[in-house]
Amino acid sequence: MIYLSKPKVVISKCLGFSNCRYNGGTENNEFVTRLKDYVDFITVCPEIGMGLGTPREAIRVVEINGENRLLQSKTKRDLTENMNEFAKDFLSSLDEVDGFILKSKSPSCGIRDVKIYPSIEKGGISKRGEGRFSSIIREAYPNITIEDDGRLKNLKIREHFLTKLFTLNRFKKCKEINEISELLKFHKENKLLFMSYNQRQLKALGQILGNIDGREKRDVFNEYSIILNNIFSKVPRYTSNINVLIKSMGYFSNYISHNEKEFIIDTIEKYRSNKVPLSVPLNLIKGYAIRFEKENLLKQSFFNPFPEGLIELSDSGK
């Protein structure tokens, strides 16, 4: 799989780019460091952007009359409208963007693990939710590829993030070319990948491409885009990956010995029982595809949904 362009990713500036956390610190992230060679980062610190200094008073998300407000913990100053205005200006300044990586647990940037307090006074946490800035981002970009640095320590979540990011970036370039022939090529090269995510949605994409005669290209691309976003709405199940691995094995099963077949199946079973990551059976099958020159199989993005330099086996287990 060839990657001709770099996705544009908005990232919290405190993730190794600047000492802009509320306490004047930064948080280096190994994954972000490696990702720098493959994406174009656009850094942002909403709290600095709306006029706060470094170091600064901590802020909290507080539920007031059923609405989440952004308040400074000591002065009780309400910064909600300041954040709303900054977020609006920031979004209007963006040209095009492919994804977001935001700081976990941050009252401005956190996606789902932000402490939401029942009052500004000291007390228990009523629940957890999203920060003010990230809330505005998700409202503006409902289908965008977005994660926080904490969840990206999980191998499956990280691989899903990268797969969605780079696949949708390739589709964007395909859409810019605006030729049905390019869309058909894109669909063909991603067929096994889509199958690993959602066979029903894959069938829906096929139906769109099977009924394009007389239709405006714009309508075809837009309809395809809607289903494509639905495909990546959830992390794929391991059972779906296993089905695709076995299907891929069928491309060369007639050319290998019984012992080789048993070895491949055994490796897939190790993946099923979580003893090895997906990359192990994936590369095993890819090796056989190279050996038997199965070019149609090798062109499938399922084997390289994102640049190989980003493959990493470490996992937080969370």
Image: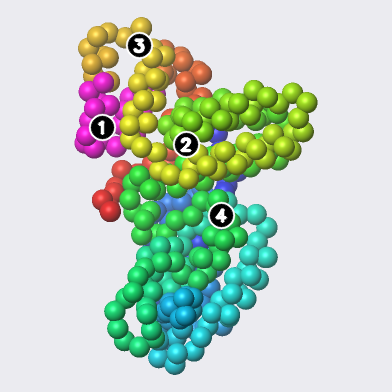
Measured in 3D between alpha carbons, the distance from the residue under mark 4 to the one under mark 1, in whole angstroms, is 32 Å
Q: Position of residue 260 (x, y in %)?
A: 26, 14
Looking at the image, which is closer to me, 2 or 152?
Answer: 152
In this orientation, which residue lies closer to the viewer: 87 or 223? Answer: 223
Gap in angstroms between the C-alphas marked 1 and 2: 20 Å
Amino acid type at mark 4: Pro
Residue at (74%, 33%) from the top-left corner? 217
Q: Is residue 257 visible?
A: yes
C-alpha distance separating marks 4 and 3: 42 Å
Which structural element holds mark 3? helix
Neighbour tally class for label 1: few under 14, some 14-19, many 20 plus, Cα within 10 Å: some
Q: What residue is disc 1 on?
A: 272
Circle 3 packing at 10 Å, graded few (<14), some (14-19), many (20+), is: some
Relative to 59, is 185 on the left or the right? right
Give the alpha-carbon distance from disc 4 to disc 2, as whole Å: 22 Å
Residue at the (35%, 70%) spot, across then down: 127
**Residue at the spot of label 4:** 142
Name the residue carrying label 3.
253
Q: Earlier in the sequence, mark 3 or mark 1?
A: 3
The nearer-to-camera label among 4 and 1 is: 4
Residue type indicated by callout 2 = Pro
Is mark 1 in CB contact (under 8 Å) with mark 2? Answer: no
Q: Which residue is mark 2?
A: 305
Asked whether residue 15 appears in the rendered view, the answer is no
Name of the residue lying farthest toward the bottom: 75
Where residue 208 appears, x then y in whole percent? 63, 29
**Which region is colored magenta?**
265-286
**Mark 3 or mark 1, which is nearer to you?**
1
Of mark 1 and mark 2, the one earlier in the sequence is: 1
Q: Does the CB distance between marks 4 and 2 fall below 8 Å? A: no
Please give the name of the residue rendered at 39% of the width and 20% of the height, measured from the top-left corner. Answer: 247
